[in-house]
Image (spheres, grey):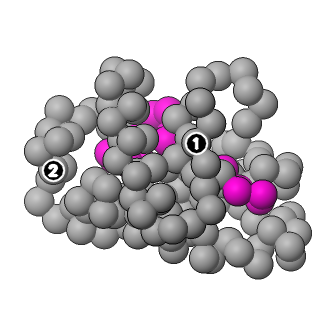
Amino acid sequence: MNGEEEGYIVYRDNYYTAFLDKYPIAPGHTLLVTNAHFENILDTSETHLNDLGKTIKMLANSIKRAVKADGIRVVSNAGRSAMQIVFHFHVHIIPTWENGYPEDFADFKPRTLLPREYYEKARTLIYNEVNRSNHNSYLIE
């Protein structure tokens, strides 16, 4: 979020930014972060929490459609004992499949830095679905 690395942003509004995980667990694994700094959900302001559920739902549905997933996991860790590693509030939105990855992502390898083509393809698919949901998002070029 500090602009030091290239990110593949799929959504941004006044409170949140969503981008592809650098080392994804599954195709389409996306992080939703607050634009303002909060350590975790327990530290987050009421103002930021008001739209959190709506934003997660919109992104989860968009991601699910984009990568043809069967389900979605939504995860946020709060505190070291909960295995929080990055101390800036974020939510993982992770697609799941019953019978393996779809053909578009057949060569996907979890938890690795993938070829640029993966990130560009996933970003385009998800961003297009976000825009179809008529949500107020914009892409940072």
* Residue 139 - label: 1
Which residue lies at the image location 77% right of the left edge and 73% below the top edge? 49
Secondary element at tag 2: loop
Disc 1 or disc 2, which is closer to the eye? 1
**Residue 62, image x and y in percent?**
41, 63
Decide which of tag 1 and tag 2 comes sooner along the chain: 2
Which residue lies at the image location 60% right of the left edge and 76% below the top edge? 54
Distance from Cα at disc 1 to Cα at disc 2 = 25 Å
Res 79 visible: no
The residue type indicated by label 2 comes to Pro
Magenta stretch: dominant secondary structure: loop
Query: Which image quadrant: the N terminus?
Result: top right
What span is colored magenta in the figure? 13-29
**Residue 42, image x and y in percent?**
81, 68
The residue type indicated by label 1 comes to Leu
Res 57 visible: yes
Left or right of 43 on screen, residue 29: left
Question: Which residue is tagged 2?
Answer: 102
